[in-house]
Amino acid sequence: MLVPSSIVTDGEEPSQYLISYLINDSVAIDAGSLGIHGSPSKQAKIKHVLISHTHIDHTATLPIFVENAYEGKSDCVTIHGSDTVLESLRGDIFNDRTWPDFVALSEGSAPFLRLERLEPDQPLEVEGLKITPISVNHVVPTLGFLIEDSRSAVLIASDTGPTDLLWNYANQADHLDAVFLEAAFPNAMNELASISKHLTPALFGLEVQKLKRKAAIIAVHIKARYRKQILRELSELDLSSLQIGQFGMTYEW
């Protein structure tokens, strides 16, 4: 599921401000909107959260999620991230200023969370899934994720500019069903996209050409202010496999 991050009351199409993906109700990729989705009991079912990078649209509600999911038991949520991400969580979020130091408070028998290091290209197995972190091209160290089970595989690119390693994994994966790929800025903002290492629809189209097999291409991380323009430019690519990410929708493969 692409977790919703906006509340619409006036009939307008919802926007995507914050980034979270929920997989099989028990694993999440990023926590931008994770802590404001569903009840605390549903959030407590999520046992692993993988953080792609430190930017706030991917981490904003992580503290709220950890608090909601806390059950005072030894079995707590595990937060996975690169060295850069774990350093940021300790220093910028769980620091007794922005939020209570849940890391220090987790040293007893009823921890709030556990922190585990992610290493690029080193798969981990959680909740019946094999997840491989893949370095992508962004302004801070960032990981995309190839997520596989016995039947299917999905690639979540995270935030990235033009990249190659990601597509190498995509082309070699068994049973690749879908790629979630960002299209952050309209073509007219190509310079900003280049500086911030994001994709425009034109760059999106060039990236998709690197995929040498059939899979659904799902456009996400579309900047809300430019959504209509970006959607129009994406449609002009005339990609038969293109879908626009639907918030709150459960994708099944």
Image (cartoon, rainbow, N blue to C red):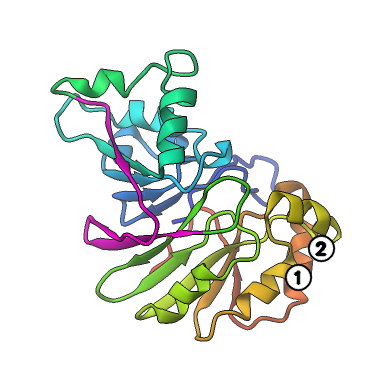
Q: Is residue 19 left or right of residue 37?
A: right
Residue 15 drawn above or below residue 204:
above
237 relative to 42 in the view: left or right: right
Give the main secondary structure of the magenta stretch: strand
167 up-or-down from 7: above or below: below
> Which residue is more in the foreground, 170 or 12?
170
Quadrant where the C terminus is found in the figure: bottom left
Q: Residue furthest top?
A: 97
Name the residue tied to disc 1. 202
Magenta includes 127?
yes
What residue appears at the point 16 percent right and 20 percent down from the top-left corner?
108
Residue 16 is marked as: none
Q: Secondary structure at mark 1?
A: helix
Name the residue type under label 1.
Answer: Ala
Up the image or down, 183 lies above or below 83; here it is below
Does 189 lie within the magenta span? no
How much space separates mark 1 and mark 2, taking CA atoms? 6 Å
Q: Position of residue 4 (x, y in %)?
A: 52, 47
Residue bearing the label numbered 2: 187
For the question of whether residue 237 can be seen, the reply is yes
x and y, in percent, of residue 199 in the image: 69, 61
What residue sits 44% from the left and 73% below the top? 169
Q: Position of residue 207 (x, y in %)?
A: 63, 73
Residue sitting nearer the eye, 86 or 179: 86
For the record, the magenta segment spans: 111-135
Q: Amino acid at mark 2?
A: Asn
Q: Are marks 1 and 2 in contact (CB under 8 Å)?
A: yes
Mark 1 surroundings: few (<14), some (14-19) or many (≥20) residues within 10 A: some
Q: Counting residues from the N terminus, which is met first, the one under dot 1 or under dot 2?
A: 2
Q: Residue at x 13, y 23 (%)?
A: 109
Query: Is residue 37 among what the camera can see?
Result: no
